[in-house]
Amino acid sequence: MTPEPPLALLAELTHRCPLRCPYCSNPTALTGSSDELDTATWSRVFAEAAALGCLQVHLSGGEPTARRDIADLVRAASSAGLYTNLITAGVLLDAPKLAALAAAGLDHVQLSVQDAEAVGGDRIGGFAGGHAKKLVAARLIREAGLPLTLNAVVHRQNLGNLPAIIELALALGAGRLEVAHVQYYGWALANRAALLPTRAQLEAATAIVEAARAAHRGRLVIDYVVPDYHAQRPKACMGGWGRRFLAVSPAGRILPCHAAETIPGMAYPTVRETSLREAWYGSPAFARFRGTGWMPAPCQGCERAEQDWGGCRCQAFALTGDAGATDPACALSPHHTLLAEAVADAAVAEAGFTYRQ
Amino acid sequence: MSIPRLAPGHRLREDQARDRWVVLGPERMFVPDETALEVLRLVDGARSLEAIIDDLAARFDAPRAEIADDVTAMLQELAGKGVVTL
């Protein structure tokens, strides 16, 4: 059966970033600036994505505004017809840069904060003065006429400030707030014991989000990404492998998700040699975990097989050593107890971080 | 008088690969049904709610009051989802 075309492209423009968040979603082995794709290649990739059926592009990193050609890249993506979303830490933004981005056709900015206030935010982000710069960036984004989403990655060390984070989103004029619990891959997996919330913390956070959604309906949309360590069923990671999204790494690898290079033995095509269309429809890597045919028991034949698509391949590999295993987040996985053990370990662990470097 | 607008960061555009229209917003997408699409095409930041209702009443064979109720309810629902502002 021919796969449906992808809906969105995650463009990881660079791995460079002034922040050092201990849950960074970049790989633990980072790509240097000399290996990054150039402006013309990214422009071609955006045109290919739009022609393939992508509607949105998420311009991400690292810190995408660390690229000096960021306005040119926004213009190329916007001209290709893509809805352009800039995912930024905000600490490199100033008024002229934002004016250039807005003029280039940028549709939306997602600005991260690491906490509700500077002491926690600067410690978690590993960047002194970062939080204050973000507050300025939020004001400049609004002044440039750009819609703002505030993104807060939450975990054991800042969940207590969740009400204050919601207040901050309102005060900054964000139309949307993303409360995203840490997902445990790469750097986050290395820091799992310092970050994992208890079940009680998770439940309190969920209740706070639900109350805030009701209280601010029509003014603030709150999207909520839950951690799967307390779950009974896995998340539909990326909406299924090779089903909704594709990602391109700073060096040009075409991936089913930004973490997919953590799985060994996979040969991902590169935009230097292969078009996005060829990669999506023709590459063995995209076909490897697509659909349900690859699934082992207990996924095979499960009534949820086409809801969660077997969960996350990267998590299955990271925790079991087998990317083709059922995601341990599922209670039916023979490895499910690994998650409860991690939660128990985290409950007695220290709060220190291994920072991204 | 109320002028409905697409919320900041939202765009109505054709999705040619799938032969449909979509509203694109920050990390989300909304696929309007046929009726919602007729309304959203008229949400241009210039027409008032009254003008939108007039336009639809002129084109569709239904009592104006009924169309007014339907359009208002639909736009309020979309406003609650953050897709339009009223």
Image (cartoon, coloured by chain):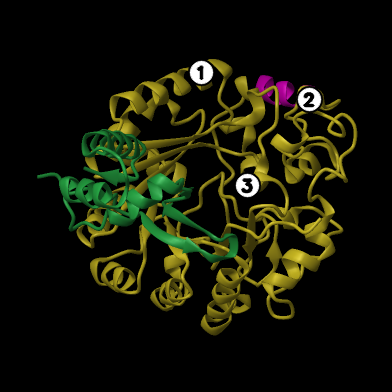
Residue most extreme to the front:
B61
- Residue A187 versus residue A346 in the image, above or below: below
Q: Residue at x 67, y 39 (%)?
A: A236
Q: Residue at x 72, y 55 (%)?
A: A242
What chain letter is assigned to the residue under label 2?
A
**Residue at label 1?**
A203
Circle 3 packing at 10 Å, graded few (<14), some (14-19), many (20+), is many
- Marks 2 and 1 share the same chain: yes
- Label whose residue precedes the other's in the sequence (2 or 1): 1
Question: In the image, is residue A344 part of the stretch drawn in magenta?
Answer: yes
Task: Identify the element where label 2 is drawn.
Answer: loop
Chain B's colour?
green
What chain letter is assigned to the residue under label 1?
A
Q: Which chain is yellow?
A: A
The amino acid type, in three-letter code, at marker 3 is Trp
Q: Is residue A125 left or right of residue A239?
A: left
The dot on residue A295 is none
- Marks 2 and 3 share the same chain: yes
- Marks 1 and 3 share the same chain: yes
The x and y percentages for residue A271 are 68, 75
Q: Which mark's residue is nearer the viewer, 1 or 3? A: 1
Circle 2 packing at 10 Å, graded few (<14), some (14-19), many (20+), is many
Q: Which residues are magenta?
A: A337-345
Which image quarter: residue A173? Answer: top left
- Residue A108 versus residue A234 in the image, above or below: below
Q: Nearer the viewer, residue A206 or A22?
A: A206
